[in-house]
Each structure stands twice: as C-alpha cells, then as structure tokens.
Amino acid sequence: MSMTDVLAAADIKNAVGAFAAADSFNHKKFFELVGLKKKSVDDVKKVFHILDQDRSGFIEEDELKLVLKGFTPDGRALSDKETKTLLAAGDKDGDGKIGVDEFTTLVAES
Ligand SMILES: [Ca+2]
C-alpha cells in the first residue's frame, strides 16, 4: 500500500508544495488540498497506517515530524513547532501520540 493507491499523485504534489516554506504548515488546509477530506473513513485509516511507519498503532512525534515525507519523499520535515502544533491538534486523550481514531477525527474536523 502506498499513498498514491489512496490519493492522486498530482494532489499530493500540490499539497506538499503549498507548505514548502518553513513554519507554513496548516493541517486543515493540507488535508483539504491532498484530497483526504473527501475520502472515506476506510481510506483515511489506510493513510494512517502508511504514516505509522513502525506499525506501532500510533503516529508518534518522530513520525509526525516526517508526515509530509510519508506522503512523498520530496516532502520536508516539519519544524519542532509545527510538529507540536499538529500533535496538540490531534492528540485528544493527551498520551503524546495519535491513534487511528484520533487521526480520522482530526481529518474530519479539519
Ligand atoms: Ca508509530
């Protein structure tokens, strides 16, 4: 399973390119541009499992930092500030990582 099995390559390129500048990342706009908001919950879960690179069942802070690279190797790493902002938005139960239900909620409420 790769990102382009779920999302259009052109949308990924466009979405990642939109946040190329340092500290410009906005997850709400990103999920919209990349086409994830229009996807079914099952598809959003597929994306979650791709981003969970070590298959721990959670997206931890180190995986979150590389979230754009999870969509395409051309993506940049998020800054520590962007990573913390994204984690705070998605980590509803405060355990310091994002579970699959937290991820689908984060995308849905974006
Ligand atoms: Ca993980």
Image: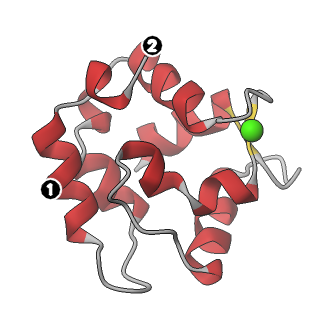
Residue 42: which numbered mark, if any? 2
Is 48 on the left-hand or right-hand side of 74?
A: right
Q: Residues within 10 Å of mark 2 (few under 14, many from 20)?
A: few
Provide the residue designation for mark 1. 14
Q: Would the CB of label 2 be found within 8 Å of ligand 1?
A: no
Above or below: residue 12 compared with residue 14: above
- Between 10 and 89, the one lying in front of the other is 10
Instruction: Tell me residue 23's x, y (percent).
Output: 44, 85
| Mark 1: amino acid | Asn
Position of 68 relative to 84 (above/below)? above
User: Which corner quadrant of the image does residue 53 belong to?
Assistant: top right
Q: Would residue 12 be found to the left or right of residue 109 on screen?
A: left
User: Residue 58: percent from the left, percent from the top?
Assistant: 75, 36
Place of residue 14 in the rendered image (x, y in percent of width and height, measured from the top left): 15, 56
Q: Residue at x 45, y 13 (%)?
A: 42
| Pick the front one: 2 or 22 | 2
Relative horizontal placement of residue 18, taking residue 53 as reference (left or right): left
Tell me the kind of residue under disc 2.
Asp
Seen in the picture, residue 38 relative to 69 is either above or below; the reply is: above
- Residue 108 horizontal/vertical position (percent): 43, 37
- N-term-proximal mark, 1 vs 2: 1
- Ligand 1's quadrant is top right
Q: Residue furthest left?
A: 10
